[in-house]
Amino acid sequence: PYVSYLDNQLPLDSLTQVISVSRGAKSSVVLPDGSKVWLNSDSRLSFPLSFASDKRCVELSGEAFFDVVSNEQCPMLISLKDNYMIEVLGTQFNVRSYEDEEGTQTVLYSGVINLFKKDVEMRTAKKVLNINPHEICVADEKTVIVQHSNEDELAKISAWKDGDIYFDNTSLGEVLKRIERHHGVNITVSDPSVLSYSITAHFDDESAVQIMDMLCYCAPISYTVDGKNFTLFRR
């Protein structure tokens, strides 16, 4: 099915609230309908001060966990990068859609959500697929991949809400990017070849220095630090 592209935008005649979360911080907000949203570091959420009677439009850049109040007559439409949009009537899910990262990841914990792809020229949006509970959907400009996962793995993905970070055979490049956001630091890599190393770890309340120390045990790397600026190099 297709829906009007114009119907999926924040209303032009309504005041818009923008919540921006800086690196090293997290936040939460209650939307006008009572839905709750947790925002991860370096994220931005836009929404009208009052939802329309037939749709609840929001825009997300970054990562957020949504707990959407059920309303079958008034779906929530979440606009993401790469012209993707999520339609949800009421459920819990996590979305990761940073502008400087490849693809958008959506993880569904309960209910059903629909993924749409906008056609800017035709000003329409076409339904791509349904995302079901315990499914992880990764979509980029050209492809959409869905995989089923267990509850433990799904819980790890949204554990950032409680300050936990899990890495499972994750490339060092991705690890460093998430540490930068989580702690609000800057990491420079002097030897790009070290980014190919993979890391499996769990961090909760460790500082950026403590995390970097642990990474040095996992791979032949070392670092220097000056305030919030880290320089990583091969040991």
Image (spheres, rainbow, N blue to C red):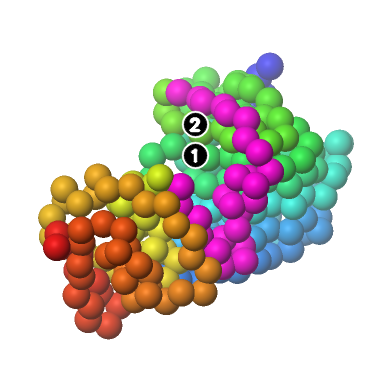
Q: Are marks 1 and 2 in contact (CB under 8 Å)?
A: yes
Q: How crowded is mark 1: few (under 14 residues within 10 Å), some or many (20 or more)?
A: many
* Highlighted magenta segment, given as a residue range: 143-168
Q: Which amino acid does label 1 sit on?
A: Thr
Left/right of residue 71 with respect to residue 135 in the rendered view: right
Sequence order check, earlier mark of 1 and 2: 1
Rendered location of residue 80, percent (x, y) = 53, 41
Left/right of residue 6 with respect to residue 199 in the rendered view: right
Residue of label 1: 104
Q: Which amino acid does label 2 sit on?
A: Ala
* Along the viewing direction, whichever of 229 and 49 lies nearer the viewer: 229
User: In the rendered view, would you say 131 is above or below 101?
Assistant: above
Residue 67 seen anywhere in this rendered image of the structure: yes
- Residue at image location 50% in from the left, 55% down from the top: 166
What is the secondary structure assignment of the residue under circle 2? Answer: strand
Residue of label 2: 139
